[in-house]
Structure formats: structure tokens, C-alpha cells
Image (cartoon, rainbow, N blue to C red):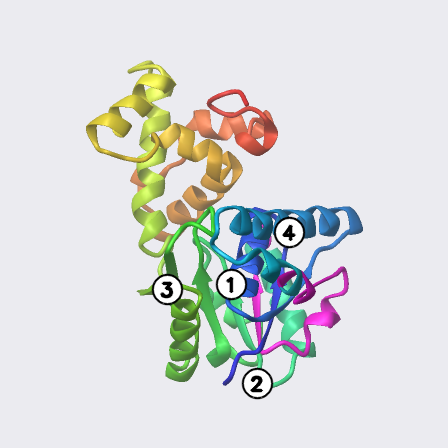
């Protein structure tokens, strides 16, 4: 299972970051978006990231042209069918992801590995949408992808040892640190992180302290790089809510109940940095 060509489904913040690090790893990359405007924005985001690498001396300036040449954009999923690995990085919705996996399973070469960047959804359920469950795996990157070193490798019920080992080696080749986790709701990262964010929102809702003060406590008192509410704005409050709902359904425990204030923010369209407003204004 030699990986030479990688497809990335989705060119948003995560998809673009994944594409960038794969190009940096020397791979040919094909990025797919559903509309021309979204694709253009995503390709521009990837190219800006490559330029930043050059500005910081991470890559040689004369290497950027070759890196751009390794990048292809498309709105046709069929252009990913000849990839050795396809990484899905679309909206955190089981039905939407499963549909992509069904289409990829039908069209891709039989050797192609199908991976998901999901932060909480069951890899086993996604694999069940295909006829190649042993070749389906979770590859959960963290935002911002070019900077964050961790990749959670999620083994579904049927994920083969060979596929796991290929993805583990790939992650290391991308200068990431892979950690293998079980296929449970939220895996490790979001099973721990999201309840903390959710509890911070409860503190804000109950008037325990202001958003700024809650974040200051966690930043200065717990040495977190940023407070949980600023982090939620960075992640996207809609994504935080979706993950909390997955945890609540998956474990059936009231401790995972999404805070009503979080839900109201999402209903109002105040989803964080990308919307210009969340717990803070941008």
C-alpha cells in the first residue's frame, strides 16, 4: 500500500491545512470542493500557507512553485478515484460523510484507503457505508493543521493492521505524532476537551464570570495557550455543538448535555471567528 497520490474532500480550514501538509510531504494532492467559489477560496488558502512556509524559512523559496504544481483542484469527486488515499474533511455530519464514502467506495480503485478527519463520528459507521471496511480509518488532524503535531488514528471495528500501519507511517512522514485510539464517541481529544468547553459556557450562562475572566483563569491558572471560550470561537461553535451532541447520544450521560447558551449562539449564527462573532467579536 504505497501512497503517492492523496485526495482531500473539502477545502475549508481543515481540508486546506491537510492538503498543505500533504504537499509539504512530497505528495501529489487533489482537492475537491462542491462549488467553484469554494474551491478557489480553498486553493488560495493552501497557496497562502505555502507562501508562509517560505517566508518563515520552513521551505526554500524556490520550492514553492513545485509545491503549487503538485496541487490540483476539482469539483468532480471522480477526479479523486485514482488516488491511493482519500481524506474526507467535510462538515461534521454522519449522513453527509457516509454519502461521500459510498461514492468513493464505488468509484475508487480497490487498493484506495478511505480516511476521515472526523473529530467525533464513528469510523465503524462510516466504514459500514462501504464494501471495503478494512480500508477505512480515522485520521483526525488538529487546527491549525500545519502547526499542530498530533494526529489521532482511529481504528474502526474492521480496520486492518496493514492500513493502520500505512497511515501511522504516513503521519510520521508528515512530521506529525500519531496516537492510535479506539472508535468511541469523541475519541480521546474531544471526549476530554469538549466537556471542558461546554462547562465554560455553562459558567458564562450562569454569570459566574465574564467570558474574558473565564478564559483568563484557564490561560493563567492552567497554562492553556488560550481560554476555552476563545478556543471554541476558533474551532467554530457549530462544530463544538455537533461534537457535544455526538457525545450526548453516544454515551447517554447527562454530563454531555450541550449548554443551552451554546445552542442559542449557533441558532443565531454566532458561530465564532468564521462568522465574525461568537463569545467574542472579530
Distance Cα–Cα, label 3 vs label 2: 23 Å
User: Which residue is under mark 4?
Assistant: 47
In this rendering, the answer to whether 213 lies above or below 259 is: above
For marks 1 and 3, the one nearer the N-term is 1
* Upstream in sequence: badge 4 or badge 3: 4
User: Would you say 52 lies left or right of 152 here?
Assistant: right
In the rendered structure, are the residues bearing label 1 and label 2 in contact, judged by CB atoms less than 8 Å apart?
no
Q: Is residue 34 magenta?
A: no
Sequence order check: which comes first, mark 1 or mark 2? 2
Q: Position of residue 20 (x, y in %)?
A: 56, 57
Q: How many marks?
A: 4
Q: CA distance from mark 4 to mark 2?
A: 30 Å
Taking the image as drawn, is residue 228 in sight? yes
Q: Is residue 150 above or below residue 276?
A: below
Over which residues does the magenta segment extend?
67-93
Mark sitting earlier along the chain (4/2): 4
| Label number found at residue 111 | 2
Amino acid at each position: 500500500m504505497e501512497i503517492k497520490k492523496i485526495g482531500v474532500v473539502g477545502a475549508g480550514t481543515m481540508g486546506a491545512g491537510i492538503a498543505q501538509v500533504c504537499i509539504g510531504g512530497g505528495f501529489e494532492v487533489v482537492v475537491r470542493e462542491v462549488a467553484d467559489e469554494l474551491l478557489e477560496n480553498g486553493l488560495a488558502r493552501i497557496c497562502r500557507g505555502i507562501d508562509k512556509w517560505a517566508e518563515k524559512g520552513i521551505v526554500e523559496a524556490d520550492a514553492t512553485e513545485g509545491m503549487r504544481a503538485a496541487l490540483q483542484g476539482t469539483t468532480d469527486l471522480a477526479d479523486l478515484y485514482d488516488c491511493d488515499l482519500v481524506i474526507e474533511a467535510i462538515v461534521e455530519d454522519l449522513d453527509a460523510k457516509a454519502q461521500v464514502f459510498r461514492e468513493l467506495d464505488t468509484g475508487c480503485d480497490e487498493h484506495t484507503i478511505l480516511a476521515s478527519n472526523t473529530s467525533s463520528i464513528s469510523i465503524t459507521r462510516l466504514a459500514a457505508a462501504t464494501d471495503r471496511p478494512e480500508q477505512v480509518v480515522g485520521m483526525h488532524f488538529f487546527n491549525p493543521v500545519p502547526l499542530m503535531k498530533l494526529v489521532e488514528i482511529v481504528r474502526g471495528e474492521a480496520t486492518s493492521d496493514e492500513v493502520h500501519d500505512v497511515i501511522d507511517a504516513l503521519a510520521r512522514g508528515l512530521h506529525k505524532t500519531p496516537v492510535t485510539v479506539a472508535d468511541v464517541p469523541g475519541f480521546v481529544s474531544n471526549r476530554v476537551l469538549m466537556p471542558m468547553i461546554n462547562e465554560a459556557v455553562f459558567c458564562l450562562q450562569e454569570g459566574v464570570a465574564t467570558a474574558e475572566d473565564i478564559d483568563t483563569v484557564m490561560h493563567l491558572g492552567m497554562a492553556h495557550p488560550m481560554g476555552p471560550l476563545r478556543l471554541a470561537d476558533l474551532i467554530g461553535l457549530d462544530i463544538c455543538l455537533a461534537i457535544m451532541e455526538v457525545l450526548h447520544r453516544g454515551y447517554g450521560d447527562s454530563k454531555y448535555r450541550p449548554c443551552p447558551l451554546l445552542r442559542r449562539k449557533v441558532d443565531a449564527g454566532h458561530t465564532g471567528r468564521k462568522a465574525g462573532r461568537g463569545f467574542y467579536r472579530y
